[in-house]
Structures are given as C-alpha cells and as structure tokens.
Amino acid sequence: MPGDPPEHRVVYQLNEAEPGYIEHILVSVGAMIGKYEDNVAIVVVVFGPGIHLLARKPRRPVPQTLRERAAGQARDYGVRFIACGNTMKPYGWTAADMLPFAQIEQVGAAALMELQEQGYAYIAW
C-alpha cells in the first residue's frame, strides 16, 4: 500500500574506483528500482577506492556520467549512498568535501553489518 514501508531491502557494497565496476552496481540499482519501483529500500555503502564516486573533487578519475547517475538515483528514487568516514580521513575529507546526497557514517563496514541486522540483503561484486 502507498505509504507502507517497502517489503524489500538491499544494501550494496561499493569499494572499487574502476568505472566498469561502479557502472555494474549502478545498473543493478536501476534494475532493482525497475523491478520493485517504490517497494524496495536501497542503500549503497561506499568505502575504500570507491569513495571517489562521492567526492566533490575525486582524486581518482570517476566519469561524470556515473556521478550524475548516482545523484539521480538518490534524488529521484531515494537511494541512500553512505560514505565511510574512516576512508575519508586519509584524504582529509569532511562532509563538505562530499557530494550533497552522500551520508557519512564513521565506519562503512559497521553500516553494512547494521543494515544486514535490520534485514537488508547484502550484495557485493
């Protein structure tokens, strides 16, 4: 029913900076949205080299099209993108250095664990 919590919950691990890897995850997120529409809660936990997807000024090359796709998924479909604070530290990054839709959690791995404890299915490439 409209307004009810979604029946399905999934959390993706995104921990690589390679554009093809990021693209596969974002395409899968889009497929989940296409299949379940508003009946799925989707979270992407981003850490390690993948963190550059969410940085305003990434230090590894991330195609703008992928950054825009992630922003659109967050804006249009409520996909949550969680950035690992521990991964940000060596770069000296704070929340201000991340894209506006990025949510910061101190420990990305802990966010993955806690979401699984809440019933989120865990997807890793």
Image: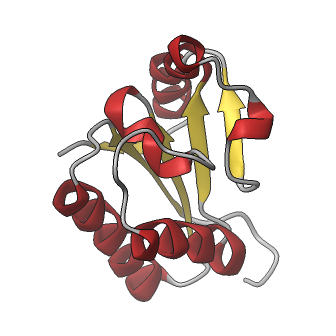
- The image position of residue 123, as x and y in percent, is 28, 46
Q: 105 left or right of 96?
A: left
| Residue drawn where x is 61% and y is 69% of the image | 71
Q: Is residue 7 above or below residue 94?
A: below
Q: 72 left or right of 52?
A: right
Q: Is residue 80 above or below residue 84?
A: below
Residue 39 visible in the snapshot: no
| Residue drawn where x is 30% and y is 69% of the image | 28
Colour mode of the rendering:
secondary structure
Return the residue nearer the eye: 18 or 79: 18
- The image position of residue 102, as x and y in percent, is 67, 47
- The image position of residue 35, as x and y in percent, is 38, 85
Q: How many marks?
A: 0
Quarter location, residue 118: top right
Residue 124 visible in the snapshot: yes
Quarter location, residue 52: top left
| Residue drawn where x is 29% and y is 44% of the image | 17
Q: Quadrant of the N terminus?
A: bottom right
- The image position of residue 104, as x and y in percent, is 69, 32
Q: Is residue 17 above or below residue 23?
A: above
